[in-house]
Amino acid sequence: MNSDNPISFGADGAPFSEQFQDIYFDSDSGCQQSSAVFIQGNDIYNRLLQGKSPLTIAETGFGSGLNFLLTLQVYQKVQQQLALQKNGESPLLPLTFISVEKYPLTKEQLEKSLAILPELAEYAQSLVEQYPDKCEQMWQGKFFGGKVTLQLYFDDAAQAFSALKTKKSGLIDAWYLDGFSPRKNPDMWHAPLFEQIARLSKEQASVATFTVAGLVRRQLAEIGFRLEKKATGGKKKQMLTGIFQQGKNSGKGYRLRPSINKPHQVGIIGGGIASACAAYALTRLGVKVNLYCQDSTVAQGASSNAIGALYPLLHQQADDISLFYQQAFNRAKSLYQQVSDEGHHFPHQWCGLLEVSYKESLEKRQQLFEQLKSWPKTLIHGVNAEQASELAGLKLDFGGLFMPGAGWIAPGELVKTLFSAAQATNRLKIKADIKIDHIQQNEDLSWQLRSEHASFNEKVLIICGGAESIKLNIADQLPLSSVRGQVSSMQTNPETDKLSTVLCHKGYLTPEHKGLHCIGATFEKNSFDTRAKAEDDAYNLAMLEKCLPGMSQWNAEDVIASKARLRCMTPDHIPMVGPMPDIQAHKTIYAHLAKDKNWRFNQAAPVIDNLYLMTGLGARGLCSAPLLADILAADICGTPYPVDSKMLFNLAPNRFIIRDIIKGKC
């Protein structure tokens, strides 16, 4: 291997490649830009801090070793942080750094190149001391007492990576795609390199690179990376980051989602929390939205309740549904706080929520939560009756499970606020009093939307209409159901006015807002009736008295208002978001799953082009809508998904037809 690398050094001592006529790193910004691209772009600090398994990083173009030294620096910072948290015991897991360099620097060139970076001097000295005098084949170095291993291959990148062995689950957690630009060094950025990146990448592997060249973006997208451009400082103004999420050789092609060119405009059917979050997410990514709302104003369906509780659905074990709602809850809190911080205000309070253990079976459930410790105490923890009373501001005879980060929101005002924030981008138009009762695909794969008095055309259509989606053609093929729920708004009194947290029993009771409390809710399956019923108010009052005797002393005369609305439910109680599946094509393509559920299929899931859904949010739309909207936006814009492939399929509309095929039901 040629180690006689023709480089020169500028007046400031920075190395420059005469062969490729390009810099090794931006001397003006020192190592800040490289840190922003590779360390922050791959979120290395947090992944080390929260890591449950050793981390493996791969790099194309070792160059001066700058990226490796920055990785050593962040590794030491995490080690120090964990040592403080663990009283001097650092549990930081090992790190392996695999790099390739076809034209390596000599030891003298390396030392001179790094001399202008005094902030990395400690790490540079360790690297230079171990660096080989002669660069042949592969060299391995050890750092921090062997906790960090550097494997440096002096070879062509694709050739070197092809020799690496990997398990079926992959080898690499993060990629630093460095090296000279594709325009100046096209030989490195060729198809064989990307084939090896795909072969070696673990599910959810990240990638970051200085280059945003179309050649690189296209090849990364082709092998399964979801990408987005980001601004960066220094001489190179943009960077590219991505996540490996849609690899085509998993053997589970039915989990693959279609890639579309980011549309200029989309149409959304709906007017509640789902469509509000979708419109907010898409307009922020530069997509124009036409919203078709059947009512005279938005937030007239389930989102019109006076007060709603925001909290995750958690089981004793960290199962799929609980993990989804945990992530969804965190995202919802983050989004709503962001909107509030931007100056778009809505009534809410993060006062916590108490699931009251009002009967023996719930006391046992609480004990299991405390024994299994599946969830952090900051998310949920048990309290006794005395602690519960203090949290609630009222005398309680029972303990329960307390979620300190939960609380209540005024849903209608939140929805209007989200739409207002989306309109502030000048990319949202709301078309009210338009009930879309039929959709039809045109020859050019766009969509015609028909109402009683007019028709509209949209290139891409998203159905977010809640229970109304069940009645719409095409969407009616999905196993959605409508569940009626009635909420009663109660006049506050001197006793209930003291309530300082949301209480959940078989129903729920919210703290006071504008002189009202909300109690509920009824649960009537397969109903589209939205008329309020006196007997349902009586049911809500009776349920509160049964579970929390003497809590309120309310009777029917204290009911200020009643509202019955519809929840859109799925059979597995998990929402759905993504492209509308071509169900008949699924039955044909994946028929062999009925004989062998593990049969490998690389054929991507057949879908109805340019038609997407975000529905089935049930009674927890306030919690799930923001994360679902992020997934939908990733579908539409090609950006990284905020969830892994398993969770993505758990939310996919085609999951039901795949399960039916496996069970031999079709």
Image: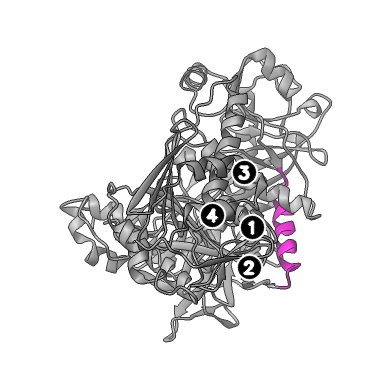
| Residue 425 in magenta stretch | yes
Residue placed at 74% from the left, 57% from the top?
417
Residue placed at 54% from the left, 74% from the top?
21
* Mark 2 element type: loop
Is residue 301 visible from the viewing direction of this image?
no
Could you tell which of marks 4 and 3 lies nearer the N-terminus? 3
Q: Which mark is residue 236?
A: 2
Of tags 4 and 3, the one toward the viewer is: 3
Mark 2–mark 3 distance (CA, rounded to whole Å): 25 Å
Residue placed at 53% from the left, 56% from the top?
109
Q: Which amino acid, mark 4?
A: Leu
Is residue 188 visible from the viewing direction of this image?
yes
Identify the residue under disc 1.
33
In the displayed structure, would residue 179 be above or below residue 318?
A: below
| Residue 457 position within the rendered picture, expressed as x and y whole percent measured from the top left | 55, 82
Placement of the C terminus among the 4 image quadrants: bottom left
| Residue 320 position within the rendered picture, expressed as x and y whole percent measured from the top left | 42, 40
Identify the residue under disc 3.
121
Could you tell which of marks 4 and 2 lies nearer the N-terminus? 2
Position of 570 compared to 485: left or right? Answer: left
Circles 4, 3 touching at the beta carbon (< 8 Å): no
| Residue 579 position within the rendered picture, expressed as x and y whole percent measured from the top left | 44, 65
Q: Which amino acid, mark 3?
A: Ala
Could you tell which of marks 1 and 4 lies nearer the N-terminus? 1
* Mark 4 element type: helix
Range of magenta residues: 409-426
Mark 4–mark 2 distance (CA, rounded to whole Å): 34 Å
Identify the residue under disc 4.
628
Circles 2, 1 touching at the beta carbon (< 8 Å): yes
Residue placed at 48% from the left, 81% from the top?
446
